[in-house]
Image (tube, rainbow, N blue to C red):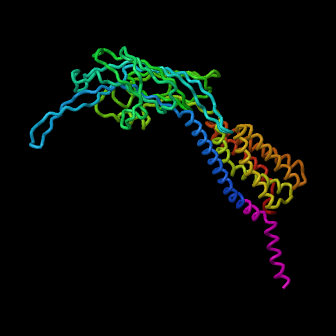
Amino acid sequence: MENEQQKPQGFMGWLKESVTVKLMFIGILIILLLIPSFMIESLITERAKRHDEMEKDVSDKWSASQLIQGPVLVIPYKRQLKDRDASNKVIIKEVIENFYVLPENLHIKALVNSETLHRGMYETVVYNTQVKVWGDFRTGLNKLAITADQLMLDKAKLTFSISDLKGLKTNPIIKSAGQSLQAEPVFNEKGLFNNGLQADINLTSTKDQPVTFDFLLDLKGSKELSFLHTGKTTDVEVSGNWKTPSFSGRYLPDYRKVDEKGFTAKWRMLYYNRPFEQQWTADDSTINKMTHNGNAIFGVKLKVPVDQYQKTMRTSKYGILIILLTFISLFLTELISKQKIHLFNYILIGAAMIIYYTLLLSFSEQIGYNLAYLIASVATITLISIFIASLLKNKMAAILFAMILTIFYVFIFVIIQLEDLALLIGSIALFIIVSTLMYFSRKINWDKL
């Protein structure tokens, strides 16, 4: 009977003292800590989404990103069609269709004056800009089955588009063919452009002569200013006071300069790499189809220099690695010092390392990522080190462990900053860490544990 009563006690004692069992429990704990880690990532995603919603709300009230398209010269023309009536007799019908002409030369020059609007802790980049547009059209009909007599030159229109008409600060006046034209909005959803503007122009006096145009757009917008490559030759120059621009779209600038004063960028493009013709007839959806694909759109984005949510998310991806290395280091410290640390204390240390990411997220929203990383790291390392010192009654062991944690967090910070070299630096650092753990673990006699 005594032996039967001692067996459970011996088994429980073995469970308590077995290093293998403890390693298994630590492994299970690390896996369980994946659950709150995923919850932290969901929280970061939710906060980033909230930031985007607030940014969009502010920009919508100011004015959205602006895309300038055109101009396009639209000339109605008469065309005769053969048809048959009810008695099968051939009749001639006259229909009116449109002849579309893109600029021979298109010049655009924009000066962007940007600023940052704040709503609470959220911020959005907005801008005011004056965009000068000028150039000329050539209405040669050599490639089309249209004669000059078919053209209705007195009913021509000059049309262009601004993606958010709310951003117009003044009514555009177009100077073309010796005329001063008032631009009016186009309310036809099936027009050449969405949010189009057009002006009636009489081209009777121009005939085969180039049709020049010149107008100024006084606009406001947010985050991005883009253009559509519509000219046979398109020259665009954009300058502004934003210090961290990003050039977007299919075409990168031929010349760019970014310094403390702002930026200047210049594009020059020919129609050889443009995805639509210089002239066409009838189809008023040609450009809209193209713009949906973004095949001829380019411009500049005014990016906020630091995206704390992206960096915090990238940091959280390394969370389980930090916990794993910390628990291994703590376990080796426990074996070398021959002092036991209860599994519950491992749980508390794991919880502190998970809460670290909520500290990082909340502080980064207020003071930026770098300073938030410093505060959260110092707070977590100090808390865990003091806790270990109280458990082991050994200040040197706690100081050593604090140094190990510091190395881990500095390692992660360097990886986050070095985006292009993150894999190389990370691989080398992990190799060094594993080598160090192998070196210290060789002094442990595992057979006696």
Residue 343, quarter of picture: bottom right
Residue span colored magenta: 1-26
Q: Quadrant of the C terminus?
A: bottom right
- The image quadrant that residue 135 belongs to is top left
Q: Nearer the viewer, residue 369 or 340?
A: 369
Lateral position of residue 263 relative to residue 369, left or right: left
Q: Is 24 in the magenta?
A: yes
- Report the quarter where the N terminus lies: bottom right
Q: Residue at 54% of width from left, 21% of height from top?
A: 111
Q: Position of residue 207 (x, y in %)?
A: 28, 16
Horizontal placement of 228 versus 313: left or right? left
Where residue 227 sits: x, y (%)? 46, 28
Q: Main secondary structure of the magenta part?
A: helix
Can residue 229 be seen by looking at this rendering? yes
In this orientation, does residue 212 appear? no
Q: Nearer the viewer, residue 287 or 404?
A: 287
Image spot of residue 117 (x, y percent): 63, 32
The number of discs equals 0
The location of residue 253, given as percent across then percent down, is 50, 24
* Residue 293 appears left or right of 308: left
Residue drawn at the location 74% of the way across and 44% of the way down: 408
Answer above or below: position of 125 versus 318.
above
Residue 54 in the image: above or below residue 265:
below
- Residue at 25% x, 25% y is 143
Query: Does the magenta-highlighted stretch encompass residue 14?
Result: yes
Q: Nearer the viewer, residue 92 or 339?
A: 92
